[in-house]
Image (cartoon, rainbow, N blue to C red):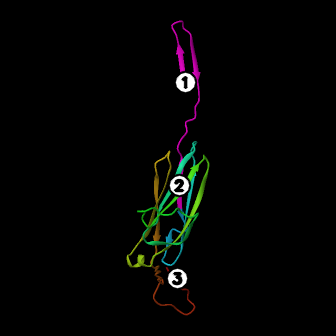
């Protein structure tokens, strides 16, 4: 901030002061161990969160909604808080508490796609997640992982017949 002061006697002066304004800065990302997943194979999610702001965040809560087409393979690390009455079965919550500037952590969740997702022609698994605190409204995002039901490869030769010892070229 700069203040200029002048008066009728043709005198002037200038004063300046720098102040740091604290900013809310909770950030969260979620990544998957694979971009494509098939039934029977495990998929690990990593949630990374951090207070990138300049002020302490209080009552930090992380929310995670697993897709209805997956089941937990093993409990998350660290373990999520107990469900509250009325929470959907696919919802996980972590009450982190207070986060000082620069503090953060990592949560790991391993899931496995349900067998029924093949019959239902599920093409992707979508998870919603978010972070919020007393100082910051919940910031939400989604992560999509594609499902593979089968993989087909078509192999074609460059011609229909060959001589003995002739090279065959496939595309």
What residue sits 51% from the left and 54% below the top? Answer: 61
Please state which of the two labelled residues, at mark 1 or mark 3, is closer to the viewer.
1
- Checking the image for residue 115, the label placed there is none
Is 87 left, or right, of 60 in this rendering? Answer: left
Question: Which secondary structure, mark 2?
Answer: strand
Please state which of the two labelled residues, at mark 3 or mark 2, is closer to the viewer.
2
Question: Which secondary structure, mark 1?
Answer: strand
Measured Cα–Cα span from mark 3 to mark 2: 49 Å
x, y percent for residue 32: 53, 65
- Asked whether 28 falls inside the magenta stretch, the response is yes
x, y percent for residue 29: 53, 57
Measured Cα–Cα span from mark 1 to mark 2: 37 Å
What residue sits 56% from the left and 86% below the top? Answer: 167
Q: Which mark sits nearer the N-terminus, 1 or 3?
A: 1
Q: Is residue 51 above or below residue 83?
A: above
- Checking the image for residue 28, the label placed there is 2
Count of residue discs: 3
- Residue at label 3? 169
- Asked whether 54 falls inside the magenta stretch, the response is no
Question: Which secondary structure, mark 3?
Answer: loop
Residue span colored magenta? 1-30
x, y percent for residue 45: 54, 65
Please state which of the two labelled residues, at mark 1 or mark 2, is closer to the viewer.
2
Q: Which mark sits nearer the N-terminus, 1 or 2?
A: 1
What residue sits 46% from the left and 69% below the top? Answer: 146
> Within 10 Å of the Cα at label 2, are there few (<14), some (14-19), or many (20+) other Cα atoms?
many
């Amino acid at each position: 901030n700069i203040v200029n002061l002048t008066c009728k006697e043709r005198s002037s002066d200038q004063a300046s002061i720098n102040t740091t304004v604290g900013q809310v800065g909770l950030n969260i990302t979620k990544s998957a161990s694979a971009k494509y997943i098939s039934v029977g194979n495990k998929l690990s999610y990593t949630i990374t969160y951090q207070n990138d702001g300049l002020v302490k965040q209080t009552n930090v809560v992380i929310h995670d909604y697993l897709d209805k087409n997956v089941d937990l393979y093993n409990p998350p690390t660290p373990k999520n808080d107990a469900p509250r009455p009325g929470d959907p079965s696919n919802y996980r919550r972590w009450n982190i508490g207070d986060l000082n500037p620069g503090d953060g952590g990592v949560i790991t969740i391993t899931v496995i796609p349900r067998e029924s997702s093949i019959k239902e022609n599920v093409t992707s698994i979508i998870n919603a997640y978010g972070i919020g605190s007393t100082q910051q409204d919940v910031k939400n995002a989604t992560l999509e992982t594609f499902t593979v039901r089968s993989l087909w490869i078509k192999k074609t030769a460059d011609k229909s017949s060959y001589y003995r010892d002739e090279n065959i070229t496939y595309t």
